[in-house]
Image (cartoon, rainbow, N blue to C red):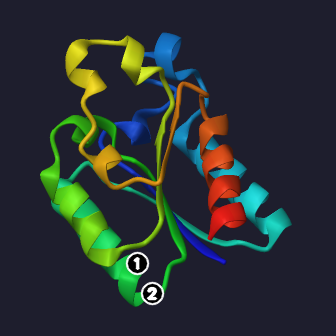
Amino acid sequence: MKILVLNGPNLNMLGIREPEIYGRTTYKDLVAMIEEHCSKKGIDVTCSQSNHEGDLVDMIQQAYFDKVDGIVINPGAYTHTSVALLDALKAVQIPTVEVHISKVDEREAFRQISYVSYYACERIIGKGLDGYIEAIDYLEASV
């Protein structure tokens, strides 16, 4: 199984940005946790992060050509604004799980809108970094 884990804007600042919401674990630690989990399960995983919407669209499109079996995506702020990410996911038709570290549904009203959710087969919200592991396990079980 081949999984792409995508992270949007500011997730590279984990451990620094609002630690009371996102915790003190760094992005590098998150990637190590994901890679270790996938290694134990024999899953081929690639983790990527970008602060640029077009780069994320390019990565989603490339996943189609790389024959990725599933995508885990935390679009960050693009969750609430990006029809482009939604359209890219719909175009490639790869099973996708949307992840959010915080309980976005309990935060500001604008954070309760998710364009990606119109495509995602599952949403995992408010489970911290463990949500990524849950998303990977979900894809492994359902794809």
Q: Please provide percent x and percent y for residue 40.
A: 85, 64
Which image quarter holds the C terminus?
bottom right
Left or right of residue 90: residue 45: right
Q: Please provide percent x and percent y for residue 26.
A: 56, 35
Q: Amino acid at mark 2?
A: Asp
What crowding class fits label 2: few (fewer than 14 Cα within 10 Å), some (14-19), or many (20 or more)? few
Work out how far the residue at label 1 is from the one at label 2, CA to CA, in angstroms.
Answer: 5 Å
Q: Are marks 1 and 2 in contact (CB under 8 Å)?
A: yes
Above or below 74: residue 95:
below
Above or below 17: residue 46:
below
Q: Nearer the viewer, residue 118 or 76?
A: 118
Residue drawn at (46%, 24%) of the image: 16
- Mark 1 highlights which residue? 63
Above or below 103: residue 131:
below
Left or right of residue 67: residue 50: left
Above or below 102: residue 67:
below
Left or right of residue 123: residue 76: left
Q: Secondary structure at mark 2?
A: loop
Q: Please provide percent x and percent y for residue 64.
A: 38, 82
Residue drawn at (47%, 20%) of the image: 103
- Mark 2 highlights which residue? 66
Q: Please provide percent x and percent y for residue 49.
A: 39, 54
Left or right of residue 135: residue 102: left
Residue drawn at (64%, 43%) of the image: 29
What crowding class fits label 1: few (fewer than 14 Cα within 10 Å), some (14-19), or many (20 or more)? many
Q: Amino acid at mark 1?
A: Ala
Residue drawn at (57%, 46%) of the image: 28
Which image quarter holds the N terminus?
bottom right
Q: Nearer the viewer, residue 49 or 44?
A: 44
